Image (spheres, helix red, strand yellow):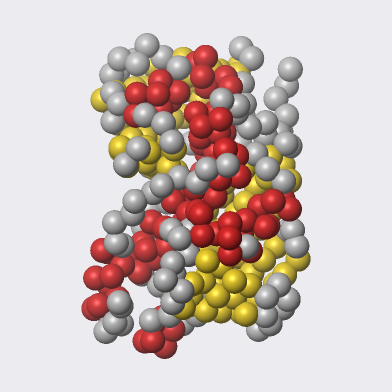
Amino acid sequence: MSKPEFVYVTYIETTPEKLWEALTSSEFSRKYWMGTELQSDWTVGSPFALVNNGTTSDVGEVLEFDRPRRLSYTFRHVLYDDMRNEEPSKVVFTLEPHGHLVKLTLTHEGFTGANKLLDGISKGWPAILSSLKSLLETGTALVIPRTALGKEPRPS
Amino acid sequence: MNIDHFKPLTVYTIYIASTPQKVWEALTSAEFSRKYFFGNAVEVDLAVGGAYIVRTPDGALHISGEVVECDPPRKLTVTFNVNWPALIEKLGPTLVSYDIEAVGDATRLTMTESHDRPISDDILSGGRQGWPAILSSLKSLLETGEPLVVKMAPPERMLAALKKLGIATP
């Protein structure tokens, strides 16, 4: 049996450079990632954090920064008690030109068994990456309520 | 048809800035599907037991099946059997379900491919290569009016696995 991981592929009408910008810019991510800011200086070995309205939900370390082809970071949840003690996992984005499109492959791996974070990210990534695709193709991100992803509303 | 013994082996979820009704039409209309489904046309008789057919751009029968569940615009389940003679005999039937749900201002579409027996990742790789391209293009079509032009190489890994099983492909 293969190790538990989440893989998602989508095709986007954009350029690798624009997609790279969207995957690494907090200004962009606020729009498609339900208000979440990506915080990092994007140097290999530097810290990485997801911050929403001043609250940090996930942290990690930049592992690879090969613009505009491959980006990876470790990923550890720090907000909710039922997921914050899990081992760090790993997020890898691969960007490949595909005709005049870009094929984006996300792999979120390194889970040590069926766990709650894997369940959560399996619901979250399709929404985030669908919204990212909409933003790049139409200029408008999707509005997807957090509750639709089985998440509690953020404490405000 | 009893589908209780089918297990989901490939799931793909995508969110679309559209309505469930428009997503339903895109999934069930020949004219729409030709634009996003590599030129293939879906022809479906929308009633339980009705025929579900996909034709290649030259009109040949590519996939044939029947409607198992039909609850517009929320759920459509069909048998989805590629028309290669030994395929169904050796691998059993393929079941495809579309679940459609309004979520905020968008619509969530979940495609689930299920089988009634274990199927290798090599065989499943064909669908896993195709579905993201097809459904990414469907999303673009509904949001921008234009589908994506996804030039897809043949699913070599799946074709090699089928050949090993003695399943002839065109």
- Locate residue B57: give its quadrant: bottom left
Q: Please state if A11 lies on the left or on the right of A150 as rendered.
A: left
Residue B120 x/y as whole percent: 36, 69
In the image, what residue occupies the spot 41% across and 31% down? A14
- The outermost residue toward the front is B58
The residue closer to the viewer here, A46 or A124, is A124
The residue closer to the viewer here, B10 or A140, is A140
In the image, what residue occupies the spot 52% across and 43% down? B146
Q: Please state if A44 lies on the left or on the right of A10 as rendered.
A: left
- The quadrant of the picture occupied by the N terminus of chain A is bottom left
Query: Compared to B138, does B29 lie above or below?
Result: below
Query: Compared to B99, does A78 lie above or below?
Result: above
The residue closer to the viewer here, A62 or B163, is B163
Q: Please state if A76 lies on the left or on the right of A97 as rendered.
A: right
Q: Please state if B57 lies on the left or on the right of B107 as rendered.
A: left
| Residue B60 visible in the shown view | yes
Query: Compared to A100, does B36 lie above or below?
Result: below
Q: How many labels does the image show?
A: 0
Residue A154 x/y as whole percent: 70, 25
In the image, what residue occupies the spot 35% across and 37% down? A100
- The quadrant of the picture occupied by the C terminus of chain A is top right
Query: Compared to B37, does A50 lie above or below?
Result: above
Residue A45 x/y as whole percent: 30, 18
| Residue A56 visible in the shown view | no
In the image, what residue occupies the spot 43% across and 58% down? B38
